[in-house]
Image (cartoon, coloured by chain):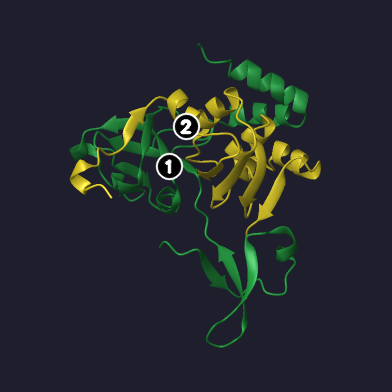
Chain colours: A yellow, B green
Protein backbone atom coordinates (compact mmCIF):
# COMPACT_ATOMS: atom_id res chain seq x y z
CA UNK A 1 0.00 0.00 0.00
CA UNK A 2 1.65 3.27 -1.06
CA UNK A 3 2.01 6.09 1.46
CA UNK A 4 -0.43 8.94 0.80
CA UNK A 5 2.47 11.31 0.20
CA UNK A 6 3.75 9.09 -2.61
CA UNK A 7 0.39 8.94 -4.39
CA UNK A 8 0.75 11.23 -7.37
CA UNK A 9 -3.02 11.80 -7.63
CA UNK A 10 -5.13 11.68 -10.75
CA UNK A 11 -3.59 11.80 -14.20
CA UNK A 12 -4.78 14.43 -16.68
CA UNK A 13 -5.41 12.76 -20.05
CA UNK A 14 -7.26 13.35 -23.34
CA UNK A 15 -10.71 11.99 -24.20
CA UNK A 16 -9.10 9.49 -26.58
CA UNK A 17 -6.60 8.30 -23.96
CA UNK A 18 -9.32 7.91 -21.30
CA UNK A 19 -11.67 6.03 -23.64
CA UNK A 20 -8.84 3.74 -24.75
CA UNK A 21 -8.44 2.54 -21.13
CA UNK A 22 -11.90 0.96 -21.27
CA UNK A 23 -11.64 -2.56 -22.65
CA UNK A 24 -14.20 -4.63 -24.54
CA UNK A 25 -16.66 -6.40 -22.21
CA UNK A 26 -15.73 -4.19 -19.23
CA UNK A 27 -18.29 -3.33 -16.58
CA UNK A 28 -18.75 0.45 -16.80
CA UNK A 29 -20.78 2.62 -14.42
CA UNK A 30 -22.09 5.86 -15.92
CA UNK A 31 -23.10 9.01 -14.02
CA UNK A 32 -25.94 11.41 -14.84
CA UNK A 33 -29.28 11.25 -16.60
CA UNK A 34 -30.05 13.94 -19.15
CA UNK A 35 -27.74 16.20 -17.20
CA UNK A 36 -24.08 15.69 -16.31
CA UNK A 37 -23.79 12.68 -18.63
CA UNK A 38 -20.24 12.04 -19.92
CA UNK A 39 -21.43 12.16 -23.55
CA UNK A 40 -18.17 13.38 -25.10
CA UNK A 41 -16.28 10.38 -23.73
CA UNK A 42 -19.09 8.03 -24.74
CA UNK A 43 -18.95 9.39 -28.30
CA UNK A 44 -15.24 8.54 -28.42
CA UNK A 45 -15.93 5.04 -27.05
CA UNK A 46 -18.48 4.54 -29.83
CA UNK A 47 -16.02 5.87 -32.42
CA UNK A 48 -13.30 3.53 -31.13
CA UNK A 49 -15.69 0.61 -31.74
CA UNK A 50 -15.90 -0.77 -28.22
CA UNK A 51 -17.97 -3.98 -27.91
CA UNK A 52 -19.70 -6.02 -25.22
CA UNK A 53 -19.78 -3.35 -22.50
CA UNK A 54 -21.74 -4.16 -19.35
CA UNK A 55 -23.26 -0.83 -18.31
CA UNK A 56 -24.41 0.18 -14.84
CA UNK A 57 -26.31 3.44 -14.30
CA UNK A 58 -26.01 5.67 -11.23
CA UNK A 59 -28.88 5.69 -10.49
CA UNK A 60 -30.87 5.83 -13.76
CA UNK A 61 -29.58 6.16 -17.31
CA UNK A 62 -30.43 8.37 -20.26
CA UNK A 63 -28.90 9.49 -23.52
CA UNK A 64 -25.45 7.94 -23.05
CA UNK A 65 -26.81 4.43 -22.53
CA UNK A 66 -29.05 4.80 -25.58
CA UNK A 67 -26.17 6.15 -27.67
CA UNK A 68 -23.77 3.36 -26.75
CA UNK A 69 -26.47 0.76 -27.48
CA UNK A 70 -27.20 2.39 -30.86
CA UNK A 71 -23.49 2.28 -31.68
CA UNK A 72 -23.39 -1.46 -30.93
CA UNK A 73 -21.11 -1.17 -27.88
CA UNK A 74 -23.33 -2.79 -25.24
CA UNK A 75 -24.11 -6.35 -24.07
CA UNK A 76 -26.00 -5.71 -20.81
CA UNK A 77 -27.50 -2.81 -18.87
CA UNK A 78 -27.96 -2.95 -15.10
CA UNK A 79 -30.36 -0.16 -14.16
CA UNK A 80 -33.72 0.70 -12.60
CA UNK A 81 -34.71 2.92 -15.55
CA UNK A 82 -33.48 4.23 -18.90
CA UNK A 83 -35.41 7.31 -20.07
CA UNK A 84 -34.75 10.59 -21.85
CA UNK A 85 -36.98 12.49 -19.39
CA UNK A 86 -39.18 15.08 -21.17
CA UNK A 87 -37.72 13.97 -24.52
CA UNK A 88 -39.38 10.57 -24.17
CA UNK A 89 -38.29 6.97 -24.26
CA UNK A 90 -34.84 5.77 -25.29
CA UNK A 91 -35.37 4.37 -28.83
CA UNK A 92 -32.16 2.38 -29.29
CA UNK A 93 -32.48 0.88 -25.80
CA UNK A 94 -36.08 -0.12 -26.35
CA UNK A 95 -35.51 -1.62 -29.82
CA UNK A 96 -32.38 -3.61 -28.97
CA UNK A 97 -33.80 -4.96 -25.70
CA UNK A 98 -37.01 -6.04 -27.46
CA UNK A 99 -34.89 -7.71 -30.14
CA UNK A 100 -32.91 -9.57 -27.46
CA UNK A 101 -29.62 -7.99 -28.54
CA UNK A 102 -29.14 -6.23 -25.19
CA UNK A 103 -29.92 -7.88 -21.86
CA UNK A 104 -31.39 -5.90 -18.98
CA UNK A 105 -30.38 -6.71 -15.41
CA UNK A 106 -33.28 -4.98 -13.72
CA UNK A 107 -32.44 -3.20 -10.46
CA UNK A 108 -35.24 -2.24 -8.07
CA UNK B 1 -17.79 -0.20 2.61
CA UNK B 2 -15.91 -3.17 1.19
CA UNK B 3 -18.69 -5.71 1.86
CA UNK B 4 -19.83 -8.13 -0.88
CA UNK B 5 -23.62 -7.74 -0.60
CA UNK B 6 -26.46 -6.02 1.25
CA UNK B 7 -29.40 -7.92 2.78
CA UNK B 8 -32.80 -6.74 1.51
CA UNK B 9 -36.37 -7.87 2.21
CA UNK B 10 -38.68 -5.89 -0.07
CA UNK B 11 -38.23 -7.99 -3.22
CA UNK B 12 -38.93 -11.40 -1.62
CA UNK B 13 -41.55 -13.33 -3.56
CA UNK B 14 -41.06 -11.31 -6.76
CA UNK B 15 -39.96 -12.54 -10.18
CA UNK B 16 -36.69 -10.58 -9.99
CA UNK B 17 -34.80 -13.80 -9.27
CA UNK B 18 -35.64 -15.10 -12.75
CA UNK B 19 -34.05 -12.10 -14.50
CA UNK B 20 -31.47 -10.75 -12.05
CA UNK B 21 -28.50 -13.05 -11.24
CA UNK B 22 -27.20 -10.46 -8.75
CA UNK B 23 -30.08 -11.14 -6.32
CA UNK B 24 -29.90 -14.39 -4.30
CA UNK B 25 -32.00 -15.86 -1.51
CA UNK B 26 -30.19 -16.24 1.82
CA UNK B 27 -31.14 -17.18 5.37
CA UNK B 28 -30.63 -14.70 8.22
CA UNK B 29 -28.00 -16.23 10.59
CA UNK B 30 -29.79 -14.73 13.62
CA UNK B 31 -33.51 -15.22 13.03
CA UNK B 32 -33.45 -17.95 10.39
CA UNK B 33 -35.75 -15.84 8.21
CA UNK B 34 -35.49 -15.67 4.44
CA UNK B 35 -33.71 -12.60 3.01
CA UNK B 36 -32.29 -11.42 -0.31
CA UNK B 37 -28.59 -10.75 -0.84
CA UNK B 38 -28.02 -7.99 -3.40
CA UNK B 39 -24.53 -8.25 -4.84
CA UNK B 40 -22.21 -5.24 -4.50
CA UNK B 41 -21.43 -3.42 -7.75
CA UNK B 42 -17.69 -2.90 -8.22
CA UNK B 43 -17.41 -1.75 -11.81
CA UNK B 44 -14.18 -2.02 -13.78
CA UNK B 45 -14.66 1.65 -14.68
CA UNK B 46 -16.82 4.54 -13.54
CA UNK B 47 -17.19 7.48 -15.92
CA UNK B 48 -18.82 10.74 -14.79
CA UNK B 49 -19.00 14.37 -15.87
CA UNK B 50 -18.16 17.01 -13.23
CA UNK B 51 -18.20 20.81 -13.24
CA UNK B 52 -14.55 21.42 -12.43
CA UNK B 53 -11.33 19.77 -11.35
CA UNK B 54 -8.50 21.58 -9.65
CA UNK B 55 -4.88 21.06 -10.61
CA UNK B 56 -4.47 18.53 -7.74
CA UNK B 57 -7.35 16.42 -9.06
CA UNK B 58 -10.11 17.34 -6.62
CA UNK B 59 -13.54 17.54 -8.27
CA UNK B 60 -16.63 19.73 -8.07
CA UNK B 61 -19.57 17.35 -8.63
CA UNK B 62 -23.37 17.65 -8.50
CA UNK B 63 -24.33 17.97 -4.83
CA UNK B 64 -27.42 15.74 -5.03
CA UNK B 65 -25.83 12.76 -6.72
CA UNK B 66 -24.36 9.38 -5.84
CA UNK B 67 -21.57 9.49 -8.39
CA UNK B 68 -19.03 9.74 -5.56
CA UNK B 69 -20.04 6.22 -4.46
CA UNK B 70 -19.63 4.94 -8.03
CA UNK B 71 -16.17 6.53 -8.26
CA UNK B 72 -15.22 4.92 -4.94
CA UNK B 73 -16.55 1.48 -5.95
CA UNK B 74 -14.76 1.36 -9.32
CA UNK B 75 -11.41 -0.21 -10.04
CA UNK B 76 -10.62 2.75 -12.32
CA UNK B 77 -12.51 6.05 -12.16
CA UNK B 78 -12.63 8.70 -14.89
CA UNK B 79 -14.12 12.20 -14.68
CA UNK B 80 -14.60 14.58 -17.58
CA UNK B 81 -14.84 18.23 -16.48
CA UNK B 82 -15.89 21.56 -17.97
CA UNK B 83 -12.75 23.29 -16.74
CA UNK B 84 -9.61 22.90 -14.67
CA UNK B 85 -8.95 25.56 -12.05
CA UNK B 86 -6.45 26.36 -9.31
CA UNK B 87 -7.16 24.63 -5.93
CA UNK B 88 -8.29 27.89 -4.28
CA UNK B 89 -10.77 28.45 -7.13
CA UNK B 90 -12.66 25.18 -6.52
CA UNK B 91 -15.66 26.63 -4.66
CA UNK B 92 -18.67 24.70 -3.34
CA UNK B 93 -22.15 26.15 -3.97
CA UNK B 94 -25.73 25.08 -3.22
CA UNK B 95 -25.63 22.71 -6.20
CA UNK B 96 -21.94 21.77 -6.27
CA UNK B 97 -19.99 19.61 -3.86
CA UNK B 98 -16.23 19.16 -3.56
CA UNK B 99 -14.91 15.60 -3.84
CA UNK B 100 -11.39 14.59 -2.83
CA UNK B 101 -8.97 13.31 -5.49
CA UNK B 102 -8.46 10.09 -3.48
CA UNK B 103 -10.93 8.04 -5.56
CA UNK B 104 -10.27 9.70 -8.91
CA UNK B 105 -7.75 8.14 -11.30
CA UNK B 106 -8.12 10.04 -14.58
CA UNK B 107 -9.39 13.53 -15.38
CA UNK B 108 -10.22 14.83 -18.86
CA UNK B 109 -10.75 18.51 -19.65
CA UNK B 110 -13.81 18.38 -21.92
CA UNK B 111 -15.71 21.69 -22.22
CA UNK B 112 -19.26 20.90 -23.34
CA UNK B 113 -18.56 17.27 -22.42
CA UNK B 114 -22.16 16.59 -21.33
CA UNK B 115 -23.84 18.06 -24.46
CA UNK B 116 -26.55 17.64 -25.60
CA UNK B 117 -27.53 16.79 -22.00
CA UNK B 118 -27.40 19.66 -19.52
CA UNK B 119 -24.63 20.96 -17.27
CA UNK B 120 -26.35 23.30 -14.79
CA UNK B 121 -24.65 26.68 -14.67
CA UNK B 122 -22.84 25.99 -17.96
CA UNK B 123 -25.56 25.00 -20.45
CA UNK B 124 -29.15 23.77 -20.78
CA UNK B 125 -30.17 20.58 -22.60
CA UNK B 126 -29.88 21.09 -26.38
CA UNK B 127 -33.49 20.40 -27.41
CA UNK B 128 -32.81 20.84 -31.13
CA UNK B 129 -29.99 18.30 -31.11
CA UNK B 130 -31.97 15.87 -28.91
CA UNK B 131 -34.89 15.98 -31.34
CA UNK B 132 -32.52 15.24 -34.24
CA UNK B 133 -31.15 12.34 -32.23
CA UNK B 134 -34.63 10.96 -31.48
CA UNK B 135 -35.70 11.11 -35.11
CA UNK B 136 -32.56 9.26 -36.19
CA UNK B 137 -32.64 6.68 -33.37
CA UNK B 138 -35.93 5.08 -34.34
CA UNK B 139 -34.14 3.09 -37.02
CA UNK B 140 -30.69 1.42 -36.79
CA UNK B 141 -29.59 2.57 -40.26
CA UNK B 142 -30.60 6.19 -39.81
CA UNK B 143 -28.92 6.17 -36.40
CA UNK B 144 -25.66 4.89 -37.93
CA UNK B 145 -25.87 7.68 -40.49
CA UNK B 146 -26.51 10.21 -37.72
CA UNK B 147 -23.47 8.96 -35.78
CA UNK B 148 -21.23 9.16 -38.85
CA UNK B 149 -22.58 12.56 -39.80
CA UNK B 150 -22.36 14.23 -36.39
CA UNK B 151 -19.27 12.49 -35.01
CA UNK B 152 -16.83 11.76 -37.83
CA UNK B 153 -13.94 9.40 -37.06
CA UNK B 154 -11.17 11.00 -35.05
CA UNK B 155 -8.05 12.10 -36.87
CA UNK B 156 -5.29 9.53 -36.52
Front-most of residues B130 and A12: A12
Q: Is residue B79 visible?
A: yes
The x and y percentages for residue A42 are 54, 31
Q: Total number of numbered labels? A: 2
Task: Classify mark 2: helix, strand or loop.
Answer: helix
Tell me, yes or no, whether the two marked residues, 1 and 2, touch with CB atoms within 8 Å.
Answer: yes
Q: Is residue A86 left or right of residue A6?
A: right
Q: Which residue lies under the disc numbered 1?
A: B76
Q: Is residue A69 left or right of residue B5?
A: right
The x and y percentages for residue B65 are 44, 52
Chain ID for label 2? A
The x and y percentages for residue B35 are 61, 77
Categorize mark 2 by other alpha carbons within 10 Å: few (<14), some (14-19), many (20+).
Answer: few
Q: Report the residue that reaches farthest toward the right.
A: A99
Q: CA distance from mark 1 to mark 2?
A: 9 Å
Q: Which residue lies under the disc numbered 2?
A: A21
Vertical position of residue A33 compared to residue B115: above or below: below
Chain ID for label 1? B
Vertical position of residue A105 compared to residue A10: above or below: below
Q: What residue do we see at 51% from left, 11% from top?
A: B155
Q: Quadrant of residue A75?
A: top right
Q: What residue do we see at 62% from left, 55% from top?
A: A80
Categorize mark 1 by other alpha carbons within 10 Å: few (<14), some (14-19), many (20+).
Answer: many
Q: Are marks 1 and 2 on the same chain?
A: no
The x and y percentages for residue A11 are 32, 32
Front-most of residues A84 and B106: B106
Task: Classify mark 1: helix, strand or loop.
Answer: strand
Q: Report the residue that reaches farthest toward the top.
A: B156
Q: Is residue B100 left or right of residue A50?
A: left
Amino acid sequence: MPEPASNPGPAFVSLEEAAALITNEAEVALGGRMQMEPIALERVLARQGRRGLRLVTVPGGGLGVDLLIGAGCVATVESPQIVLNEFGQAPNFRREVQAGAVRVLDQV
Amino acid sequence: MGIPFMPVRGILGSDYFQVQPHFKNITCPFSGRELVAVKAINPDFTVIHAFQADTRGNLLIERHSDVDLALQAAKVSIATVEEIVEPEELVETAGRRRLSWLNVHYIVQAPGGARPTACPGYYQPDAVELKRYLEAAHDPESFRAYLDQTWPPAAA
